[in-house]
Image (spheres, rainbow, N blue to C red):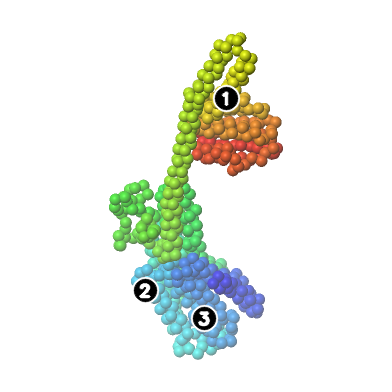
Amino acid sequence: MSWRRGLLIAAPVVAFALLWIWIPDSPFQSDPIAAITDAVTGWILVAAGLVTWSRRPGSRTGLWLVVAGYLWYVGDLYFVLPNASIVPLLSFGLRGLYDVLLAAALLSFPGGRLQSRVQRVAVGAVAVAYGARAIVFLETAFPGFNYPDNGTPNPFLLLSDRALAENLDIDLSLVKGSLVLIVGCLAVARLLRESAATRRVLLPVVVGGAAWATMTLLVVLGQALAVNFHVQLLPWANEAWWPIPEYLIRGSAAPLGFLVGALLLRTARSAVVELVTGFEHSPLRAQLEPALRRALGDPGLRVAYPAPDSGWTDSSGTPLDLPSASSPVASTPVVSNGVTRAVILHDPALLEDPGLVSAIAASVRLAMDNEQLAVALEAQLEETRASRRRIVDAADAERQRIERDLHDGAQQRLVSLAISLRMLGDSLGDDASKVVRDELAAAGVELRGAIDELRELAHGLDPAILRESGLGPAVRALAERCPTPTKLQLELDGRLPRVIEATAYFVVAEALANVTKHAQASQVAVRVRAGSGQLLVEVEDDGRGGAEAGRGTGLRGLADRVAAAGGTFQVGTTAGGGTRVAAELPTAP
């Protein structure tokens, strides 16, 4: 279908170029300005019709404008086929038929329907006046009168009284011009009654149409006054420059108005795109009305939502009444799964494009369904995050319990046993054999080693320095105990939430442990910085690299713990080939 429309709009241009080149001594060559204006006027009508047709496929206005554009060229057939047939005579008689279609388009744009009986009567009267004038012309025209001297003899000639024929032609032209002006007045009255959204599209159409209607009447009225009363209505009518503005206003004002109005029409696709891009973040209700107003060009648009108890409310919860059947406001429900989720209250003129309204309603329905799914998904994610936090908290509580049990239980027992062994050795005196004394000494050494290991284990489970002094001293203690030379950079200001401090501590502890066991590094850098609501923890070595977040229970457990705290965890390779472990944690609650 698109190539056919392209052919329609290209045909006048091609025909004009061919006539300009091939027809000798034609007006296209003798008066090029008038010829170009004539050609462009019809082309603008065709273009306006095609744009309207593409944006409102169900409207007849587009078709009327295309036909009017081609009928504009009917009068030029005389120059194409001079003396060859009866066609040039008919072309003179049928000139002005496009006025009838312009009148219908002016009062029906863009929906393609004449909305009142007065409008239909006015357009019908213009058609009757045009038909009467065309019939009189065909029955009175002969070569040399209303028709070029070299024209084909008129086979329809019934009246050869030149004076009577001239008076009839002027009178009927005056009637037609008056009716065209009435159509222009009806268009202005319609514009004043329409909503702001419709006026935006109609304004250029009505301005151009009113100029066309006014100039049409002024020209024929001036002719009537000059012939009958020898009075010049327009004193400048005989000036050499006057035909150009007269021709432009009569011929091009209405086509240009239709073209601008057609370009202002919104297609369903562009309106849906504007609507969808207008949705940014939840909540949807706060942005739905502004997005719909922008997409539909209707500043008075409202959206009603079902109230919790009964009735309807706006986005802020204020009660809102739906329009009655006689109200000038139209309503379009948004139904999802058989339930009315919202009702769009809008300009009735939008109903002239059902595809636009349906597309907008479908987009709103999809957006509301997506919002509902997003809310449900966010609730599930929040429950998952809360569950992970509970697991971490439970694990920390269990660590503390085990640390207390080790400190108060096994560790105290071992310390008591060490004291007993030392007292036993002291009580043996010099009478004990060397073997017994050596065995007691060895047992004491092993026991002290076990106590140290148990104390180190308890410290790793729940370091007391972290609880009592905070993250900075705890990380400094880890760096001091690390056998690999460690460069420490701390930028902390006060205490942080307990979960964040514990998570950051274990990130550093696990990373330093991996450096000691696997990295074969010569040095390691530890950076802990707090600022802008975030805590950044980095451990970077110059070792052999190769660590991955998904490998090993230690790093995988750290990733889970950081995610449970609402942070992000990364393990990668440095520029020098070592390993970089980084975690970013939120410090604000």
Inter-mark Cα distance, 2 to 3: 26 Å
Residue drawn at point x = 40 percent, y = 64 percent = 351
Q: Position of residue 540 (x, y in %)?
A: 64, 34
Q: Secondary structure at mark 2?
A: helix
User: Which of the two marks, 1 or 2, is nearer to us in this view?
Assistant: 1
Instruction: Determine which residue is flagged by label 2.
Output: 121
The disc, 1 or 2, on the residue closer to the chain's N-terminal end is: 2
Left/right of residue 489 with respect to residue 191 in the rendered view: right
Amino acid carrying label 2: it is Val
Q: Quadrant of residue 77?
A: bottom right
Q: Position of residue 558 (x, y in %)?
A: 55, 37
Amino acid carrying label 3: it is Phe
In the drawing, what numbered circle is on residue 92?
A: 3
Instruction: Determine which residue is flagged by label 1.
Output: 450
Residue drawn at point x = 49 percent, y = 80 percent = 94
Inter-mark Cα distance, 1 to 2: 110 Å
The disc, 2 or 3, on the residue closer to the chain's N-terminal end is: 3
Marks 1,2: beta carbons within 8 A: no
Residue 400 at least partly seen: no
